Image (spheres, rainbow, N blue to C red):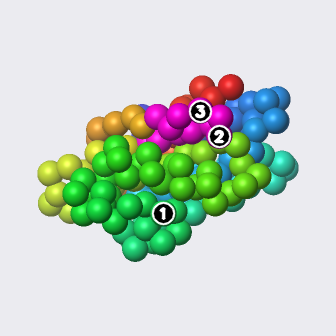
Amino acid sequence: MNVNDLKQHLFSLCLELADFCQAHDLKLVTAESCTAGLISGYLTDLPGSSSYIEGGFVTYSNYMKATMLGVNQANLDKYGAVSKQVALEMVSGALNKAFHANIAVAVTGFAGPDTHDLVGLVWIAIQRRDRKAIAYQYNFLGDREVIRLQTVIEAIKLLLTLS
């Protein structure tokens, strides 16, 4: 898919998530690293999004992950920011900080471009307040924009499973 196709698909998913959240009385909080607020940005492009979006955290640095979301520094040091452990702590931390939210998504990954061997590696974690957090690993292909768009798309698809 090219960028325009990805954006069209993303727009339809945003509409679907809006309907889903309203139908199930869900309010969302996001914790974003590699997407730097794109999930919140795309979702709040829709009118009426304040009825299902509580807010979001952009925690690009490890310092922000630790101070804003309560991610354990020892886990950041041991596993790295792009890991299952950190994604799970990010999603739980977002829910702990956003009292009115009942679902959350967190993303952390390597979007590139650089010489890092792991460009495209992304962890997405989701959680409903009354359930255990779950994290999923992805290996996306493409340039920085494509990797970030694919991350947003997959994050929204996962949120749609939290009924």
Report which quarter residue 137 is drawn in: top left
What residue would you read off at disc 2? 129
Which image quadrant: the C terminus? top right
- Secondary element at image label 3: loop
Which image quadrant: the N terminus? top left
* Tag 2–tag 1 contact (CB < 8 Å): no
In this view, the residue in front, 153 or 90, is 90
Q: Is residue 128 magenta?
A: yes
What residue would you read off at disc 3? 131
Q: Separation of disc 1 and disc 3 at Cα? A: 19 Å
The amino acid type of the residue labelled 1 equals: Gly
* Tag 3–tag 2 contact (CB < 8 Å): yes
The amino acid type of the residue labelled 3 equals: Arg
Indicate which disc, 2 or 1, sits on the residue closer to the N terminus: 1
Q: Separation of disc 2 and disc 1 at Cα? A: 17 Å
Q: In this picture, is 130 found above or below 118?
A: above
- Secondary element at image label 2: loop
Residue 30 appears in the picture as rendered: yes
Q: Is residue 82 left or right of residue 48?
A: left
What residue would you read off at disc 1? 70
